[in-house]
Amino acid sequence: MGKNKSIIIGSDHAAFELKEKIKTYLFNKGYIVEDAGTKNEASVNYVDYGKKVAKAVSNGEFSKGILLCGTGLGMSMTANRFVNIRAALCSDVFSVKMSRLHNDSNILVLGGRLVGDILAYELVQTWLDTGFEGGRHLERIQSIDA
């Protein structure tokens, strides 16, 4: 199926339920989903799961990842500490689309306490369907990485 149809996903306890719904959604769309955890709603440290996903995308094991926590803030801060990670915390379709078009985001971050499942499906699908424009935007990404 290839790396482009494989996604790694992780969440903390606050977003566990939404993560499970997104996993099912992706599976039904033909994606291979690697679940980095957590495995239930018991309280955990979101950093542990943010690091697992960000490291797997950073080292090229996966081209894309999805992270979820209560607000998405902690996961986005954690993930963006890794080299070559462009994690985008989004809660609307326009931001998701622009995160791909102009920023080539490789991790989508959602707030499980802020986004319902129907909107989450639309955000994930828009993120997966939108490509990177390149051009002047590539130069900007390279400038960030420098």
Image (cartoon, rainbow, N blue to C red):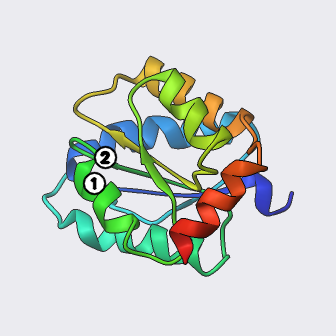
Image position, residue 121 (x, y; %): 53, 26
Drawn side of residue 42 relative to residue 76, left or right: left
Image position, residue 137 (x, y; %): 67, 50
Drawn side of residue 89 relative to residue 134, left or right: left
Res 84 quadrant in image: bottom right
Q: Is residue 118 above or below residue 134?
A: above
Q: Secondary structure at mark 1?
A: loop
Q: Secondary structure at mark 2?
A: helix
Image position, residue 144 (x, y; %): 52, 67
Tell me which residue sits at (63%, 42%) in the image: 102
CA gap, disc 1 and disc 2 = 6 Å
Q: Nearer the viewer, residue 139 or 124?
A: 139
Tell me which residue sits at (60%, 31%) in the image: 97
Question: What's the residue type where badge 1 is placed?
Answer: Asn
Quadrant (top left/top right/bottom left/bottom right) for the C terminus = bottom right
Q: Residue furthest top?
A: 118
Image position, residue 129 (x, y; %): 73, 33
Q: Residue furthest bottom?
A: 59
From where the camera sits, is residue 71 visible? yes
Tell me which residue sits at (63%, 30%) in the image: 125
Tell me which residue sits at (45%, 66%) in the image: 36
Label ID, residue 132: none
Q: Which residue is mark 2?
A: 16
Q: Considering only order in the chain, which callout, 2 or 1, is on the residue closer to the N terminus? A: 2
Question: What's the residue type where badge 2 is placed?
Answer: Phe
How many C-alpha atoms fall within 10 Å of the one at disc 1: few (<14), some, or many (≥20)?
Answer: some
Label ID, residue 40: 1
How many C-alpha atoms fall within 10 Å of the one at disc 2: few (<14), some, or many (≥20)?
Answer: many
In front: mark 1 or mark 2?
A: 2
